[in-house]
Amino acid sequence: MSLPHAILTALLEKPSSGLDLTRRFDKSIGYFWSATHQQIYRELGKLEAEGYIRALPSEQPARGQKKSYEVLPAGRAELERWTAAAQDPKPHRDALLLRLRAAAVVGTAGLEADLRRHLDLHRRQLAEYEEIERRDFTPAPGDDSAQVRLQHLVLRAGIQLETFWTQWLAQALEELPGPADRAS
Amino acid sequence: MSLPHAILTALLEKPSSGLDLTRRFDKSIGYFWSATHQQIYRELGKLEAEGYIRALPSEQPARGQKKSYEVLPAGRAELERWTAAAQDPKPHRDALLLRLRAAAVVGTAGLEADLRRHLDLHRRQLAEYEEIERRDFTPAPGDDSAQVRLQHLVLRAGIQLETFWTQWLAQALEELPGPADRAS
DNA sequence: CCGGACATGTAAAGAGTTACATGATTCC
DNA sequence: GGAATCATGTAACTCTTTACATGTCCGG
């Protein structure tokens, strides 16, 4: 039940149309909560029906017409409620770790190439995060509002997670049995 | 599409009944691929229908009777195929990071208690992993088969991830605005 | 022989993904 | 005015979660 709150957050940061949101979910917010445009349009409809958001006055009700939304006070209140509410962490699901566990049983044949590919993807993501940090979070000292500090904290989580994955994958590739003794 | 392969892996490690599997998914495999008993029973039915597994000979077809499964050659072949196949990493979803991002907009009121709770949960998980490492992965040198090394590698991923979260959460708690200037 | 734990399932709702459909705008 | 692109949406399907249902076994 987090998608509506992700959308409310994005709309509070900046009122947007469905496609604008979709684009922002490919970056930024999407780094830790992804969503497709189908999910977003469906959810925008629900949020509007519940009175949490409304379409901006330039109302063209037709299809193919851009429609921007803004958050209403009830929506902000709901987001505040959700932010403060206790939530249990969801159990992780990581297909790659599962595959390594399977490989421990059926052999590592064919695995190396995909591990290298994953390593490359994580390195790119890490570089992207570090670029954002350079660009957006190197202000003059004292310029750090609570809002900026929180955003930076979230970004650092991304950086540290990607750092972990690159290091772990590099280690995994070292430990993988070579082609000689790779059993199946 | 990973649940069937998680089950095949678990069954290859040790033939089990549905409830046995459910218990094992609360530990071990479940550390990185969780599943409820409803999912497991449904998937066992599918896997049996597809000829990947079969019920062990002590066949009591009745309800309330224990029924154990083992993997057939076709099931092992499918697991090998899946292990070697290229797979794109799924985009992450982390509700806690999303909440911090929301808090950057609507304020951090009420957040601290839940962050402390998460920190405690991650510390416990880390301690559990470290206990497993002490118990199962401190053999005499040279005693490390490829299988054991892979299992240890997966466990180390868990340890390092939990280590990251404990450190990051501790840092987050430090940076959180105190009650004095915590705006809403 | 009854209550509780064990064991296997069914039903329905919710969330996410994939494929497709439709109208508007813009560029040639 | 035709093609490509932008923008919004529908439909069908899969996966996951939650709640419930049913039967067996065992201790008292």
Image (spheres, coloured by chain):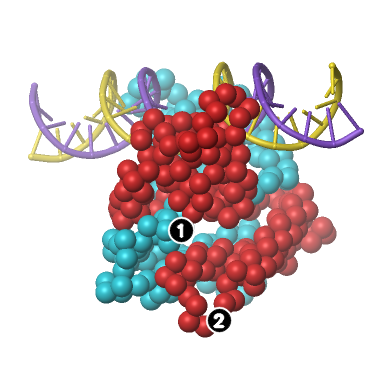
Chain colours: A cyan, B red, C yellow, D purple
Residue B140, numbered label: 2
Amino acid type shown at disc 2: Ala
Please determine whether, in this image, residue D23 is positioned above or below residue B124.
Answer: above
> Pointer 2 indicates a residue of which chain?
B
- Can you see residue A91? no
Q: Residue furthest bottom?
A: B141
**The C terminus of chain A is located in which quarter?**
bottom left
Tell me the crowding category of disc 1: few under 14, some 14 to 19, or many 20 or more residues within 10 angstroms, Cα based: many
Q: Position of residue A103 (x, y in %)?
A: 39, 59
Labels 2, 1: front one: 2
Please determine whether, in this image, residue A42 is positioned above or below residue A148.
Answer: above
Residue A101, numbered label: 1
Q: Position of residue D13 (x, y in %)?
A: 37, 26
Please determine whether, in this image, residue C7 is positioned above or below residue B7.
Answer: above
Tell me the crowding category of disc 2: few under 14, some 14 to 19, or many 20 or more residues within 10 angstroms, Cα based: few
- Can you see residue B156? yes
